[in-house]
Image (cartoon, rainbow, N blue to C red):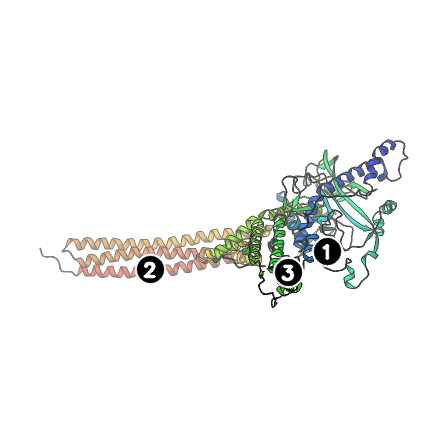
Amino acid sequence: MAEPLDFSIKRTTAPGEDYYRRQAESMELNASVTEQPSNPLDDAAARKVHRRLLEWYYHEKDRQSANRLEMAMDSDFYDNLQWDPQDAAELQSRGQMPLVYNEVAPMVDWIIGTERRAKVDWRVLPRTEDDVQMADVKTKVLKYTADVNRVTFNRSRAFADAVKVGVGWLDDGVRDDPTQDIIYSKYEDWRQVLWDSTSYDLDLSDARYLFRWRWVDEDIAAEMFPSRVDQVREAVEDTQHRTTDEYEDEVWWHPEERAQLLGTEATRTGRFGAASVGEAKRRRVKLIEAQYRMPVKARLVSSGPLRGAFVDERDMALMAALNRVGGSIIEKLVMRVHVAVFTDTHMLAMAPSVFRHNRFTLTPVWCYRRGSDRLPYGVIRRVRDIQQDLNKRASKALFLLNTNQIIADEGAVADWDVARDEVSRPDGVVLKKPGKEFAIRRDTDAATGQISMMTLAAQSIQKSAGVSDENLGRRTNAVSGEAIKARQLQGSVVTTEPFDNLRFAVQVQGEKQLVLAEQFYTEEKVVRLTGAKGALEWVKVNQPEVQADGTVRFINDITASMADFMVADADYAGTLRQVMFESLNAMAMRLPPEVALRLMAMAMDYSDLPNKDEIAREIRQITGQPDPSVEPTPEEAQQLAQQQQMQVEALQMQREQAMLALEEARAKVRELNARAAKLEAEAGAGSPDGQMQAAIDQVRAQAAQEIDRLSDALRKANAELAARTIQANKDADVAIERARIEAASRERVAEIQAGSDRAIDQLSRRLAELEQRMNTRPAAPA
């Protein structure tokens, strides 16, 4: 077996690094006598910043290189590249295939798929009461920005990187391209980014610096920095063309070694019949971008709707907004973000960041971070050793099942090579000499043990990552639906941290995008939104309107105030949402219809239906319930107030009608009871009559029952009419709707009262018969 992999990093000196280390002192000594450079980027201050940035860059490159190597290994494990080349070569020399039973890929795919099924929602909130409508406009503008920049897909890519290797990156900024939207949002490869590893905060707000780099063709770099063409050419290198720019210290499995293992040519294009890639040369230069914080005195807005914004003369939108809405400005010592682009030998550009948010443009999406050094790792890191052990045990079991041992006396066969070949054949025949022992041994018990350990390894991977067979939809020993849901819920709880970190990243990225929109959406613009069933909605921003006095007023001016970006409440796991959705629907089935509809609207918040918002909106329209997530317009608020007043008056009228009908019935029953009492007294004065007394008691009981029945009927009718009042169409005329409900109420109460009057009249006639019977009864003897 090959020796364990050595993960120690051996890096040769980078171009320009030794140059600054050797000549730093001499450059400082000679700075006073050196001729003043023509370009400010070549003066002593710029060179000092350049040296500091290089020191930070190479320091982080060394400090993070070991962990980044393991991140690259984690990524390879997901891509089925799980064997060390030496171990794989040794297996192939024995005629075995380096088998890979990839248990980590389904686990990672489940986490990634869960994120793509349950997207994080957000909205923009106002800072003052006057900005409520403007906050809704900004929400729609950011939705448009997210659509045109495919932010949802970029976030999914960054989250996939975080799950696999520990961190993914999102980049938000502006571009000078008239063919595209001015604000961009992109995915950034983790292999091209280094950051301040001493930072504690997840948003890197306490980080001093952040680096990323690109290999750019010489002609493109020269056009990017026309005043620094000579410096660009000094840093140009002849490099072989590759489809990807691999990180110099992270090539754990070199492409040539991989190709040799697979028995193919080392070149990539050679498989397709093209020329060798080694012949393709490109003159390219490595451009390094640094975003770093420096303590400087800066001017900030200290009051007004733009409070907290950095005042920069280049920010024309802010200066114009300050002239319109006002605000005081103060000077304060702050850590200001600067941006520099340089090579290993020269500074190409350097200036304070133009962005008002004073943050790095790159936003990290973390999975897990080590407690000792805060370096990231993904879910694969926890189970990588177990996965490697599983693969080796699988190959070992296959080797044991395919090999046989021969135990024989010396001279038992004439030709041992022939005997070995025959033993390896399933239909082999071995001729042994008489009197000689010749036995074939197949060690199946050892292979069974290896397979058992493979099973344990696969179970350990699931336990460590929190993704069980139930989450993956596989058949298990869990039979009941509740047991399956419980295990699925447990998997969702174990994987909470990556999703919580994603929500935090969405919050940080959204705050940056909001500030970019407030700063750079200065022109007149019409944005498009796609609503339910593909309906289009158009929102106009920064629309100039000439007033009567000749002044110009801008409608929906998003640059005139600041707002807050807020992620929606924490979303529940898919299994828990389904359980809550089913529970609310089951509860609604046992409630009255008017209450059930309201509960169903609440249940839609936990549904996975693609058009759940539209369904909830339709239910709310039926019940007349307003949408709590939508701020009503002044007209809607006025109409809602009128409708509520109509409902209150209608309900009061319904109660008064019901109470009047009930009081009339009670008055009639009291009259019946008085007549019954008089009749009972007259009957008791004479000889006792049991039948008469029973008839009187029956009339009293039926009268009491009629009052109870009437009260219950009026209560039910009142509830039905109240529900109808609440469900009144908000678009209907309030007066007409009120008149209709009052008419229905009077009709319903009159119908119930008429039925009660008939029943009471029947009791009255029954009592009259008893009175007549009492009057015609013979007088008692003296």
Q: Earlier in the sequence, mark 2 or mark 3?
A: 3
**Residue holding disc 2:** 757
* Side of 573 where 766 appears, left or right: left
| Crowd around label 1: few <14 · some 14–19 · many ≥20 (10 Å) | some
In terms of secondary structure, where does tag 2 sit?
helix
Indicate which disc residue 439 carries: none
Residue situated in front as seen by the camera: 605 or 326: 605
Disc 1 marks which amino acid?
Arg
SS type, badge 1: helix
**Label 1 vs label 2, nearer the camera:** 1
Q: Which residue is mark 1?
A: 258
Identify the amino acid type marked 3. Ala
Q: Are marks 1 and 2 in contact (CB under 8 Å)?
A: no
What is the crowding at mark 2: few (fewer than 14 residues within 10 Å), some, or many (at least 20)?
Answer: some
Mark 3, Cα crowd under 10 Å, few <14 / some 14-19 / many 20+, is: few
Q: Amino acid at mark 2?
A: Asp
Say whether residue 327 is left or right of residue 18. Answer: left
Are the residues flagged by discs 2 and 3 in contact, CB closer than 8 Å?
A: no
Where is residue 147 drawn, in percent x and y? 68, 55
Question: Which quarter of the figure is the C terminus placed in?
Answer: bottom left
Q: Mark 3 or 1, which is nearer the eye?
A: 1
The disc label shown at residue 535, or none: 3
Is 751 drawn above or below residue 339 in the view shown? below
SS category of the residue bearing label 3:
loop
The number of callouts visible is 3
Observer-nearest residue: 54 or 204? 54
Residue 498: give x, y in percent of width and height: 61, 48
Query: Above or below — where is 340 with respect to 452?
Result: above
Q: Quadrant of residue 200?
A: top right
| Residue 334 vertical placement versus 592 (above, below) | above
Q: Is 625 positioned to the left or the right of 315 in the image?
A: left
